[in-house]
Image (spheres, helix red, strand yellow):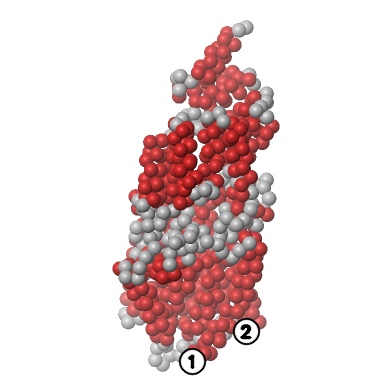
Amino acid sequence: MLTFRRHLIALAVLCALGMVAYSGTLHNGFVWDDNFQLVRNPYMHADQPWKPLLQGDAWSYLRGGQAQLSNYYRPLQFVSYRLVAQAAGMQPGAFHAVSVAFNILASFAAYLLLARLTGSFGIGLAGAVLFAVHPEHSEAVAWIAALPELGCALCFFLAFWLFLRARSVDVARFPAQPAKGKKKNLPTPPDAGRSVWLTAGSALLLLVALFWKEMALTFPVVVGVYALLFSQRRAWRERMRESFLAMLPYWGTIAVYLAVRIAVLGYFSKTQHPWPLTPLQFGLSTIELLCKYWLKLFVPLGLNAFHTFTPAMGIFEARALASLAWLGALVAIVLYGARRAPVVSFGFAWVLVTLAPVLNIRGVGENVFAERYLYIPSLGLCLAVAWLAAEALRRVPPRAARVTAVAALALVATLAVAHTRARVNDWKDDATLYARSVVSSPQSGLMHSSLAQVLRDRGDFAGAEREYQIALQTTQNAPRADDTQIANAYVGLAGVYTQRGQYDRALDALDRAGRTKVDLPAAHSARAIVLLYMGRVEEARALLEESHRYFPNDEIVLNALGVIALGRKDYDQAISYFKQTIGIAPGEPDGYNNLGRSYGEAGRWNDAVTPLQRAVELAPNNAMFRSNLGTALANVKRYNEARTEFEAALRLDPHYEPAAASLERLRRLSAQP
């Protein structure tokens, strides 16, 4: 019996498990795409309009709100980010708390769905517990950028729950056959009017799910499979008709979504990563990818932020044959269980159908195989496992069955929570994530380049150069050489050489990047920075202005343009560029330092103090920043504070001449009457 009290018990259990498993994320920072889509997204600030969040894809902010950069139209993701940012500021803990809350709500929605589907509180709760603690979900919950998985799942599950409530679902009830001498208690079918409203609510929730993530496009097919398997009609023709009618309202919702999507993006889908494969190779690779996902569901070990994927090249490869055999077994299980165990068949079909959108290796992102994509599909496996376990325990005396079920579920949950908590630590920060990813996926050029960027930002140029060289070697030697990754590694090397003052080597690396990938914007802006260091200001400005037209929200380009404007003593223009820079990258000290310099050279020393103080807060070990702050403080007659900054600068770099000269002038000044 599904009572309100049991629902509260389920909610309490799932809340406790969700918090215990993922409380560690609250201390993690921003990682990977978080630093771009969230931290450096200008539309996250309260003074920016909301409209661009609704009218562009996930990367449109890079081009000032223009769409057509990716297949990811997810407006609710960015609206949610904006709401959290305005409520709590750019505090990573607040965003992680939202992800943890969404995971708990999605787990409870999973419980409602499974309990309604099976008519069993025990199966519903067991399946939801397996879902809540599955280690495969750690990426979706621990990574802020994976919020669309959680939001889509919550709405997807609730939409299906309302669909079930709008129908009579007695065929799916557990146990499948009533005990002898007992009548089976069937639910009362909803009246026609209530059924219409429930279906309308379900369709509306589907629309919301679609604006979270495209995976919800599979919802009508899931509904059709359910209606086909659990129809009370015997003839398959009648079942097919009932299945078609059940899907109709949801295809209408899909049509509305597609109209909005195409109006915004200008297309339904585009090729993001062309793979030079024959149709046979593409099909074999898709099947192998599907089997890899199934294996991860069953055995959630070797979790990793970036799994390298090598396409299948021939049908007689061992992995291709194994994948075909596994796919055949899955189809056989679904067909065999259609009448004998429809719940198991439906669970397996759920996994197969909901995985379909991410099997298109040409349409997904750089990471072809991603653990977060299993968040929604995993519910099907949790349903099948919980139902099979309950069916097995029916042969055990009731009291022993309850004890066994509770003990087994507690053991599985404990092991899963321990595994999840350990995995959450991998997402602590960029350095930790990339360092562990290159160990797990040494053939990933992207992860080596990402780790190199972290080392370069820390000033470890030797380590950065080593990782960029590894990225080049692994990518060039891969079965499918990714020109973009090769070019990006060359651009990264150019950055290392530039910071070492090796400008000729930097330009040579950029030439190699240009020959590998002609239309790489990062290579043009990197070349401009090198030319700027070399004193070739006009050439640099032309390249930077071109890059700025293409990527108006690139903080590196804006900062460089500001430096050029400052050199021309165009202080108003320089201040404007630097304000935009810190608006996009509020955690980077260079923008604040340059803004303070601009105010100072314009004679606005009072305005210069605050941004220079912020630069020192962000980079307390930078002698130049402390010296610049000391100069500003001295000019507003805060001499004691100025002396403190100059002395701190000299402790950091005893040979920093500007700080030494300023301190000496300050001493002479203080010696005067």
**Comes first in the chain, label 1 or label 2:** 2
Q: CA distance from mark 1 to mark 2?
A: 24 Å
Image position, residue 98 (x, y; %): 53, 55
* Residue 66 visible in the current orientation: yes
In the image, what residue occupies the spot 53% across and 60% down? 148
Q: Seen in the image, is 381 located left or right of residue 204?
A: left
Q: Position of residue 33 (x, y in %)?
A: 50, 50
Q: What residue did someone put label 2 on?
A: 191
Please name whichever residue, 218 or 284, is drawn nearer the observer in this view of the structure. Answer: 284
Q: Secondary structure at mark 2?
A: loop
Up the image or down, 612 lies above or below 491; here it is above
Q: Which residue is mark 1?
A: 234
Q: Secondary structure at mark 1?
A: loop
Query: In which quadrant of the rendered view does residue 127 lie?
Result: bottom left
Q: Name which residue lies at 55% across and 17% down.
A: 662
Tell which tag, 1 or 2, sits nearer the viewer.
1
